[in-house]
Image (cartoon, rainbow, N blue to C red):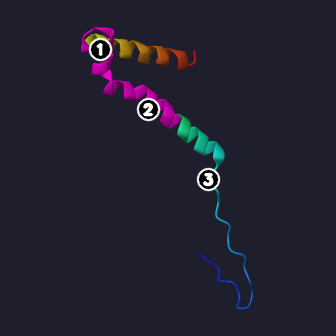
Amino acid sequence: MRIKPAKGSSVPPQAKERFPLSLLCLTLGAFAIGMTEFIIMGLLPNVAHDLGVSIPQAGQLITSYALGVLASVHPY
């Protein structure tokens, strides 16, 4: 329920809250990490060609990289 101010009284306008800088940094960091993890899938044929291996073998390379990332961030 909103309470209306009395006539003649001045109520300062509410200040618009700013987006926290720390949350912006976390958002951008998560986006960058996500892009580096997933962009390699689009480049898979190029990676396979450059390494001289088949596409499934290059996919296994990417899988092993992903498992290495998983092992490095998992707290024990």
Per the image, the residue denoted by label 3 is: 19
Residue 62 lies in magenta, yes or no?
no
**Magenta residue span:** 30-55
What numbered label is drawn on residue 1?
none
Could you tell me the amino acid type at mark 3?
Phe
Q: Earlier in the sequence, mark 3 or mark 1?
A: 3
Per the image, the residue denoted by label 1 is: 48
Asked if one can make out residue 74 in the rendered structure from this viewpoint, the answer is no
| Dot 3 alpha-carbon crowd within 10 angstroms: few under 14, some 14 to 19, many 20 or more | few
Could you tell me the amino acid type at mark 1?
Ala
The answer to whether marks 3 and 1 mark residues whose Cβ atoms lie closer than 8 Å is no
Tell me the distance, in whole angstroms, between the alpha carbons under discs 3 and 1: 43 Å
Tell me the distance, in whole angstroms, between the alpha carbons under discs 1 and 2: 20 Å
Q: Residue at x 75, y 86 (%)?
A: 9
What numbered label is drawn on residue 35?
2
Can you tell which of label 1 and label 2 is closer to the viewer?
1
Could you tell me the amino acid type at mark 2?
Met
Residue 10: name its quadrant. bottom right
Give the left or right position of residue 38, taking residue 6 as reference.
left
